[in-house]
Image: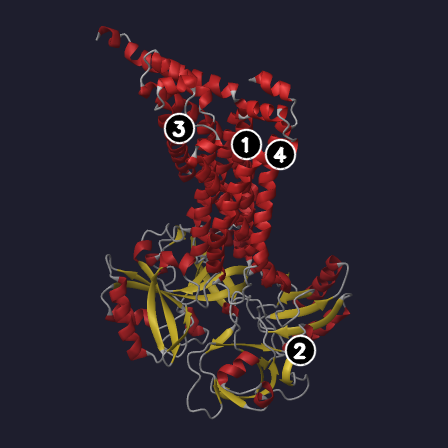
């Protein structure tokens, strides 16, 4: 007891720890080549795991910051045509929320939110700004979704018509350092009064708001908030705790049958929207649960490969440490002591690998944030989650990679250790061979996946869209009411700009989100008894020049003609003809269709074109003639100096629309933006497939080096007996090549199954190319041959006298 009090109880464990670490360091330094291979493989694996895991966590964190997120649901609308399911809309009817709160006790509160798109807003200094995300919302939006107010009263901010709440960054843009409360804003010909400022919303929400105006303002814009004839707003419900979603949806079904024909309301948890909801009229392009799960699997597999490398190489080189362990056992060392010694070496390697991984993560963060498409990802290094995950990873990897070698090697009997009468090397370890096969199987699957993803993305980007998107410049029209003659004059004057060949005006554009299109299900062939109910038809006005400007093709009939009567004339595409039952394109010309209480004559049928990306099916499109307004101006340009052409266009803009923001984009970029999520996914898979292959090759290099070193004497004897260098090379490489072949055979069905499941999410998809498997197999064989062959060839060419002397 006295000795313990003097500190020896603490001194002895520290002394033993120092001894274990010193001994481990000595052994690692003696075998520093193999230690470096282990550290490099583990560092790359840990860095990959940390980066992918944080991406996955971010994708799964949507809406978690809302206090009531577990109790918030969104109601969507399933449309049917008879008994056939057609589509699910995110948008519902304005009276739905109040009706559900009145009739269903599970509903504590509702909030209606209507997407107003991007809008031009003018401050009191007559400066116009484009605000990206404008929504109209009920006052209860601040009760259901707990936004942090900087200024204003959340209980009263949106109670009155034409009141608005801004985010902090929007308030800064519009008012600078001035107090925005009580200030007027011009919006769509009306005056809004700013009543509140909230903190900017985080990136992990599907409702990214910049400006909220009161929902009651919509009545002043001519929207009937009591009508069940149109569904244009999102409906969110705050439910009582422990609400049974299945039972509530059953009640919604009964409610729907009383209120609607051929449609059902369904509630979905708000936290599921980002990854599991891919309905029409989503506020933004959502993520994909399958993609996130696939990346999570890749993260664990890369980490597994790094850990397997360590276990493989440690057990393969066991004989180097077993003699020392045997001597210690003879001298009385317990198995526990040996376990601690081997485990100390694992801790040192894992700690070095972890510190290296942190450095790699720090260096890779800017690049990672770019390919992940998540600017917030750049800050993961400073989050508690990152460090807690990292420390748990270090601890788990120490246990996983250290326990098996430590217990397996410490279990060897002293006599076996001293006489080396135990199996060792590649041929002696069935487990080791299995692990090598597993590593290459994983690497092959990930490599095939990266090829298939790349091919699918190229397929979508290269596919004929039914219109020309190259060298098409699109200007966003001024929001304020403009004289139609002024719009047409601007359009004509654009042709004076060098490089501008054609111009057109339209109410929307191909490639824009569905939120920017008008839609209706009330379209029917004139005289038909039944509406073509259930189908969403998409509509917007165009002038006579859009068809030739975008090189859209007519299947039958004619285009609109400027200067001739086009009233009640429409262009439809072939898909709309099919759904309306108008027959072939030639027969559809001259027929009439009814919608919005009017009758229209089909003057032309457009060949099908992709309004959306090739991820989505063709849409039934209807266009009416409109040359009196322009949400967008479309310019076909051919120039080698695009910057000069854009400057000339902007000059014309300032002459006609001074004070209105000048904004443009290229149509091909707009289409490619729809593949942004898939492109990021492909980049991540591609990069980490290289990680996987590289880490696997590091392990193979270590095993090959050690296997060759162990057979130095055998090789020397064979050479003395007349064996050729080629024969020795074949002897040393055949076992490894056989394992790679087995891995390729196992990887083929796994990769096909995984990629076929991923491709199911595309309306237009490639067939999985057979050559992806062949090329992957050949590449794996080549890399394995070069990795193993390099080591083997060096030994095969060594003078046999040196080989025998070394033994």
Which disc, if any, is residue 485? 2
Residue under label 1, please give it. Answer: 704
Q: Nearer the viewer, residue 513 or 611?
A: 611
Residue under label 3, please give it. Answer: 405
| First in residue order: circle 2 vs circle 4 | 2
| First in residue order: circle 3 vs circle 1 | 3
Colour scheme of the picture:
secondary structure
Residue under label 4, please give it. Answer: 727
Q: In the rendered image, is residue 127 in sight?
A: no
Nearer the camera: disc 3 or disc 1: 1
Residue 3: quadrant of the picture: top left
CA separation, marks 2 and 4? 87 Å
CA separation, marks 3 and 4? 34 Å
Say few, some or many: other residues with alpha carbon within 10 Å of mark 2 (under 14 / 14 to 19 / 20 or more): few
- Please state the horizontal and vertical placement of residue 753, each as a whole percent of the image: 46, 57
Q: Nearer the viewer, residue 129 or 402?
A: 402
Q: Secondary structure at mark 3?
A: helix
Task: Give the total number of marks visible in the rendering.
Answer: 4
- Please state the horizontal and vertical placement of residue 606, each as a whole percent of the image: 61, 80
Looking at the picture, does residue 376 appear above or below residue 770? above
| First in residue order: circle 2 vs circle 3 | 3
């Amino acid at each position: 007891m006295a000795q313990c009090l003097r500190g020896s109880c603490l001194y002895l464990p520290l002394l033993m720890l120092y001894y274990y670490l010193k001994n481990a360091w000595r052994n690692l330094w003696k075998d520093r080549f193999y230690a470096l291979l282990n550290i490099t493989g583990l560092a790359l694996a840990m860095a990959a795991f940390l980066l992918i895991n944080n991406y996955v966590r971010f994708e799964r964190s949507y809406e978690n910051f809302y206090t009531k997120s577990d109790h918030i649901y969104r109601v969507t609308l399933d449309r049917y045509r008879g008994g056939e399911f057609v589509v699910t809309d995110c948008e519902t009817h304005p009276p739905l929320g109040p009706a559900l709160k009145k009739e269903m006790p599970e509903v504590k509160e509702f909030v209606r939110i209507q997407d107003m798109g991007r809008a031009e807003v003018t401050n009191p200094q007559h400066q116009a700004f484009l605000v990206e995300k404008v929504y109209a919302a009920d006052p209860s939006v601040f009760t259901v979704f707990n936004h942090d107010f900087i200024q204003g009263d959340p209980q009263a901010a949106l109670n009155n018509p034409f009141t608005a709440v801004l985010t902090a960054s929007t308030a800064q843009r519009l008012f600078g350092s001035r107090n925005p409360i009580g200030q007027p804003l011009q919006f769509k010909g009306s005056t809004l009064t700013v009543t509140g400022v909230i903190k900017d919303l985080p990136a992990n929400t599907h409702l990214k708001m910049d400006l909220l105006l009161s929902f009651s303002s919509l009545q002043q814009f001519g929207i009937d908030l009591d009508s069940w004839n149109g569904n244009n707003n999102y409906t969110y419900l705050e439910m009582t705790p422990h609400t049974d979603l299945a039972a509530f949806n059953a009640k919604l079904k009964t409610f729907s049958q009383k209120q609607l024909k051929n449609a059902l309301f369904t509630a979905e948890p708000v936290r599921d929207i980002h990854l599991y909801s891919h309905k029409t009229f989503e506020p933004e392009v959502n993520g994909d649960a399958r993609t996130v799960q696939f990346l999570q699997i890749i993260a664990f597999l890369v980490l597994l490969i790094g850990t397997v490398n360590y276990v493989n190489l440690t057990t393969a080189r066991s004989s180097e440490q077993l003699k020392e362990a045997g001597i210690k056992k003879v001298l009385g060392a317990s198995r526990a002591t040996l376990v601690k010694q081997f485990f100390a070496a694992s801790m040192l390697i894992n700690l070095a690998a972890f510190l290296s991984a942190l450095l790699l993560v720090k260096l890779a963060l800017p690049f990672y944030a770019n390919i992940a498409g998540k600017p917030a990802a750049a800050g993961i290094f400073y989050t508690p989650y990152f460090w807690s995950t990292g420390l748990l990873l270090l601890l788990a990897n120490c246990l996983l990679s250290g326990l098996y070698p430590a217990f397996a090697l410490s279990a060897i009997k002293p006599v076996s250790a001293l006489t080396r009468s135990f199996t060792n090397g590649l041929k002696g370890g069935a487990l080791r061979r299995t692990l090598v096969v597993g590593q290459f199987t994983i690497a092959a699957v990930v490599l095939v996946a990266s090829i298939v993803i790349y091919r699918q993305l190229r397929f979508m980007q290269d596919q004929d869209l039914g219109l020309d998107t190259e060298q098409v410049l699109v200007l966003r029209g001024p929001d304020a009411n403009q004289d139609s003659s002024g719009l047409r004059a601007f359009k004509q004057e654009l042709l004076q700009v060098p490089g501008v060949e054609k111009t057109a005006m339209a109410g929307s554009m191909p490639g824009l989100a569905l939120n920017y299109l008008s839609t209706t299900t009330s379209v029917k062939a004139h005289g038909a008894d039944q509406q073509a109910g259930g189908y969403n038809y998409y509509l917007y006005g165009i002038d006579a020049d859009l068809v030739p400007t975008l090189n859209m093709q007519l299947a039958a009939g004619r285009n609109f003609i400027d200067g001739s009567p086009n009233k009640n004339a429409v262009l439809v595409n072939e898909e709309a003809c099919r759904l309306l039952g108008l027959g072939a394109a030639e027969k559809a010309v001259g027929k009439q269709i009814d919608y919005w209480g009017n009758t229209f004559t089909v003057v032309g049928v457009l060949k099908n074109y992709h309004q959306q990306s090739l991820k989505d099916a063709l849409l039934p499109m209807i266009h009416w003639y409109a040359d009196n307004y322009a949400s967008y101006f479309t310019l076909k340009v051919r120039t080698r100096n695009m910057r000069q052409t854009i400057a000339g266009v902007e000059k014309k803009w300032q002459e006609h629309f001074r004070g209105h923001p000048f904004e443009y984009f290229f149509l091909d970029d707009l289409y490619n933006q729809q593949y942004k999520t898939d492109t990021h996914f492909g980049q991540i898979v591609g990069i980490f497939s290289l990680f996987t292959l590289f880490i696997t090759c590091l392990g193979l290099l270590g095993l090959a080096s050690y296997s060759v070193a162990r057979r130095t004497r055998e090789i020397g004897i064979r050479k003395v007996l007349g064996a050729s260098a080629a024969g020795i090379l074949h002897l040393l490489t055949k076992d490894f090549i056989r394992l790679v072949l087995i891995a390729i055979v196992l990887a083929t069905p796994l990769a096909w199954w995984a990629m076929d499941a991923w491709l199911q999410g595309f309306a237009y998809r490639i067939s999985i190319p057979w050559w992806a498997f062949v090329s992957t197999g050949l590449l794996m064989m080549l890399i394995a041959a070069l990795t193993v062959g390099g080591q083997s060839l060096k030994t095969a060419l060594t003078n046999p006298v040196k080989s025998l002397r070394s033994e």
